[in-house]
Structure formats: C-alpha cells, structure tokens
Amino acid sequence: MTATTNNSASNNTGIDKAALKEKYRQEREKRLRPDGVDQYIRLTDGFGEYLSDPYMEVQPREPKTDHVTVAFIGGGFAGLVTGARLKEAGIDDYRIIEKAGDFGGTWYWNRYPGAQCDTASFVYMPLLEETGHMPTEKYAHAPEILEQCQRIGKQYGLYDNALFHTEVKDLVWDEDNNRWIISTDRGDRFTAQFLGLGTGPLHVPKLPGIPGIKDFKGHSFHTSRWDYSYTGGDPYGAPMDKLRDKSVAIIGTGATAIQCVPHLSRDAGELFVFQRTPSSVDVRNNIPTDPDWFKSISTPGWQKRWLENFTANQTGGFVTEDLVQDGWTDLANRIRSRVLSLPPGEFTLERVQEVWEDCDYEKMEEIRARIDSIVEDTSTAQGLKAWYRQLCKRPCFHDEYLQSFNNPNTHLVDTNGKGVDAITETSVIVAGKEYPVDCIVYASGFEVGTEFHDRCGFDLTGVEGRKLSERWAEGMRTLHGMHVHDFPNAFIVQPTQAGNLISNIPHNLIEGAATIVSIVKHALDNGYQRVEATSEAEQKWVDIILQGGAMSLFNPDCTPGYYNFEGQDPGIRGKLYVGYPQGPMAFFQFIDQWRNSGKFDGLEFS
Ligand code: NDP
C-alpha cells in the first residue's frame, strides 16, 4: 500500500493515494449497517445494573424545597468552572445537582485502570492557575484529574449546597415567578432563578447490540463502572490480582480500550481483545512535569495563554510557537507549513484540501508503520491497522497498547469489521469460533446522536408549556450554542453551534462559564428577572451555522462511528451538529467581545 510512484502518488510523498482511497472505501463499506445508532442497547432497557455506582454509597437526605439563584445540572468541569467563576463574581447562591456521588463528571465514572487525559494536562485540567496545582505529568492520570475536580469544589465552597446521587427528572419554567421548578428522583422540588445545563456529551454508557448478551453467566461490566471488587487493583494502577487465573474479554477498541488493555494484558490470565474497527494509535510520549520548568512557565495568565496557543495550533491558526507540541498539534502544524509553502497562484481551496489530504495520508502511513515496528506477529500487526483519515475517529495516543499484543496471553480477535457475532452463557463467538471467558469488559462507549432529553432523562418545559424535545425534534437550534428562545434564564454549556473544539472540550466549557457569569451578573446588577434569546437572534445564528459550511461530523468518506452518526446520513440534524463556521478561535474571540461589550445582542432582559 505504500511507496509506489504511479500517477496518483501524492506530491513528494510516494504514497499511492488512489489505492489508499479505495482501501478506505472498502473498509468503510464493510462496517456500514442499516441500524446505525440503533444497533446499541440503551441501559435503561433492562440493563440498569450496568449503571449503578460501584464507587460510593447513596447517602440518605431530606428533599429540598428551597430557592437558589443559580442551579446547575452536572458536577463535571462545566458545573465546577461555572460555580468557581460565579463565586469569584460574588454570586454565592449556587447549587450543583449531580447524579454521581461526588464532583468529577466523566472523571468520577471513568476509573478504569490506565485512564488518563488525552490532551495535555496544562490545557485540559481547568483552573490550574487558580488552584495552584501543578499537573504531575504531561498527560495526568484519572485520579489526579478527579482530585483537581474535588480541589475546585472545596476551594470555591461548591460542596456546601451540592446535591449528589440526584437525578433531575423535570424542569418547568414558572412564568409568573420567573424561575425554574426543578424536580428530582430524590423527592426534591425547589426553584432557581437561573439554570445551567452541563450534562456532557458522553455520559450515558451503552452496550453493543450483540445477540445473546443477556445470557452471559460470567461477570461483566462497562468500563465506566469498573468493578475493582471483581478484578482487584485500583484506579492508581495496582495489579488486578484477582484476574490472574481469569480469562477476560474486552469488547471495543476505542479510546477507552486503548488505555485499559495494557493493564488487562499485564494482569489477566488470558486476554481476548475483540475488535471491530482499529483505532489509530500514535505516540504518547508522556513525561513527568519538571517543577523548575513548570515554575518558569506559570507566570500570571499562563493557562489562558496555553489554552489559546493549543487551540490556535490545533485548529490551523497562524501562530509562531507550539507550546504543547503533541499528536493533536502535529497534523495541524504539518498542514499549515505545507499550505504556507504553496506558491501564491496555487493558494486555492482545492489545493489546500489536497494538501490536507496528503498530510493525513502521510500521518496515517506513519501510524501504520509504527505498528509494524512494534507488533511482532505480522498478522496481528496487520489487523491493528486503521484505514481511514485520522480525524474520522477519535485519534488515540499510547506507548504501551501496541506492545501488549506481544504478550503471549494477549490475543487480538479481529472481527473484520463485523463485530462480535454472539454471546452465550460462557463464551464470545466470532466467525463460528467460541472464546470461553470468565469476564466480559464492555468498552463500547457512550450514547451519542440520541435525543438530548432521552440521554439526560429529563425534558425542559419552557414558556407556555413548550418542550425542548419538540423544539429540537428537527435538530438543535440555539443562539451561540447556549440559549434557546422560549426557555428563559436557561444556559446550556456545551460545544455544538459554538466553539466545537473537540480536541480540548474544557476550553469550550471555560468560555461557556465566562459567558453565563457575565449574563447573570448583568441581570442581577440591573434588577432584571428574566433573560431570553429572541426568536430572530436564534434564527440568525442557526442560519450562520447552516450556511457557514463548517465541517460536519457527518463525513460520508469516514468509517462509521459516533463521530458520524454511525455512517447514516442524519439529514438536517447533522448539518446543525457543527460549530461556528470560522472555527473555535474565531468563536472564542467573538463571544469574548460579545459578552464584554455589555450589550448582549440577541438577548432580551426584562
Ligand atoms: P467508543 O465509542 O470510542 O468505542 C466503542 C468501541 O466499541 C468501538 O471500538 C466500537 O467499534 C466497539 N463496538 C461497538 N459495537 C461492537 C460490536 N458489536 N462488536 C465489537 N465491537 C463493538 O467508546 P470509548 O469509551 O472508547 O470512547 C468514547 C469517547 O470517550 C472517546 O472517543 C473520547 O472522546 C472519550 N475518551 C476520552 C479519553 C481521554 O480523553 N482520556 C479516554 C477515553 C475515552 P467501532 O469503532 O467499529 O464502532
């Protein structure tokens, strides 16, 4: 597949682009299935035991019936940063409602061995400057990130009023009193003048729709509810000694599996890795932080500078320095330098896209060659190769995943794009072959592309009884990804129709928090009870989103996955599932000016 010199070879690279394109097409075709996102099992459908909290017991408490100024649903980064910024602005009366037993969001649930951030800690972990924490590694491990969440909670007094192990069931706008009525599964029914929603895009685990999955009589769990009482070990990486005589299956090879397979390989008697589509696994190069170096960079305002620098580098901005220097910025920098060297006459959209494609082919060839250099068994090495463009699926980075397949106890079971055929009482079956196992670990990911209200477990009832589910039946419609007409005093903190910076989600949330604080402060300082996006402003924003030509997650040339609605054309919903057309940096600059202007164009205060 590499190093040919025919007519279709990309400029200067010797890569046979036509052959690669055809290979990518074939691999995609293999995986297309008509049921798309419906192939997965929702855990509410009789699989509720996979959702229970293995980490903390639910504490009894009295239901709340009081009133708060700001209620926020979700105790992950969005709720924490918003709370911190509100407190800094002197708005103290803030309550987080969280279904987990503590703060942390994704880092509360995902305690699987080897979990670590995939984006450099210095830009990924929020409020480092404010809390004075130095990440111990370039890519911090999960316990340290969870501790940072708890540190923020403690430093800003966010624990005092928080409700844990509490799921919101209903949100109703009370027009007469200009407030939201919040009902939960713990019997609470309290009110809030302002409402924030930071429920995260990937918080509901799902299972693969494999025939017989319910018949399995061995032990099984989802990676986001790791059962250390069964495996032994702990989230810090202690040996899972109870697996020594066990045969373990892991189903799925996405970003989660890439991180926990090395630990399973180290500790399990036998490990079978069931693969439908390989991930692209680039170099990690994690290093401990040198305190002297950290001291030298952490001058006032350092984290904002790093955030902006990473975003500019990763999204193709024209910057002279790359502070983070990692796999995320590598491809973007490669494309930028190649584009900049184009002769002036060739600086056209087509040529830029061609250059981008060339760089991607080169990058993926490097990633595939790395597999050959590490994995000893040639057929396993071949099976681990990803045949798609790097950003078709979540890029992964690891320095021990590929090496695991050199361990004699670790077996890749490549399903040739078809997935596992069946599960029986004792075994996993692929291509007619039975693999008897004691335990199945589902690394099968999280619901994406399902309806917002289904995923969250609640709907919003706004002005005159209008439901958010009905408003969004034909796709998401917002002003700035945050405000929805008819849903006053409610703010959604998430990336879509806004910055949509996928490589560093926290940057989107940090900007969202700043926006909420400026709006709430403006309302409180001026005695306004109500703030709402006008219908015209919302429509104008949706038009910008639709006409802007931002790259949709629905990319017809990509192999199916949650990035592209499993390869099914989602129609208008997919076209709305994008970011600000000019990209994340432009959006962050725009929204900064918007909130600092004090005019809040598109919002009506009363
Ligand atoms: P993913 O959705 O990425 O992966 C699910 C895996 O299950 C895929 O490999 C999928 O294959 C496989 N699968 C589904 N059905 C079957 C089947 N029937 N038979 C065999 N395999 C099947 O979930 P992850 O939990 O890995 O990652 C989700 C996201 O969470 C990441 O993309 C990332 O955004 C985030 N994450 C972030 C991390 C970080 O920042 N440190 C770490 C881990 C996750 P196929 O690809 O063919 O669909």
Image: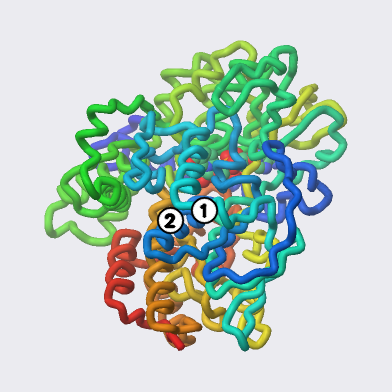
**Label 1: few (<14), some or many (≥20) within 10 Å?**
many
Q: Position of residue 198 (x, y in %)?
A: 54, 59
Total number of numbered labels? 2
Q: What's under tag 2, amino acid-wise? A: Ala
Q: Position of residue 271 (x, y in %)?
A: 67, 20
Q: Residue at x 84, y 33 (%)?
A: 216
Picture quarter containing residue 128?
Answer: top left
Is residue 149 in view? yes
Q: What's under tag 1, amino acid-wise? A: Leu
Q: Position of residue 96 (x, y in %)?
A: 57, 58
Q: Nearer the viewer, residue 219 or 409?
A: 219
Q: Residue at x 41, y 33 (%)?
A: 139
Quadrant location of the N terminus in the rendered image: top left
Q: Position of residue 431 (x, y in %)?
A: 75, 31
Is residue 387 in view? no
Q: Which mark is residue 8?
A: none
Whether 193 is drawn above or below 200: the answer is below
Q: Which mark is residue 158?
A: 1
CA–CA distance in space, label 1 to label 2:
8 Å
Picture quarter containing residue 334?
Answer: top left
The numbered mark, 1 or 2, whose residue comes first in the sequence reads: 2
Q: Nearer the viewer, residue 88 or 425?
A: 88
Ligand 1 shown in quarter: top right
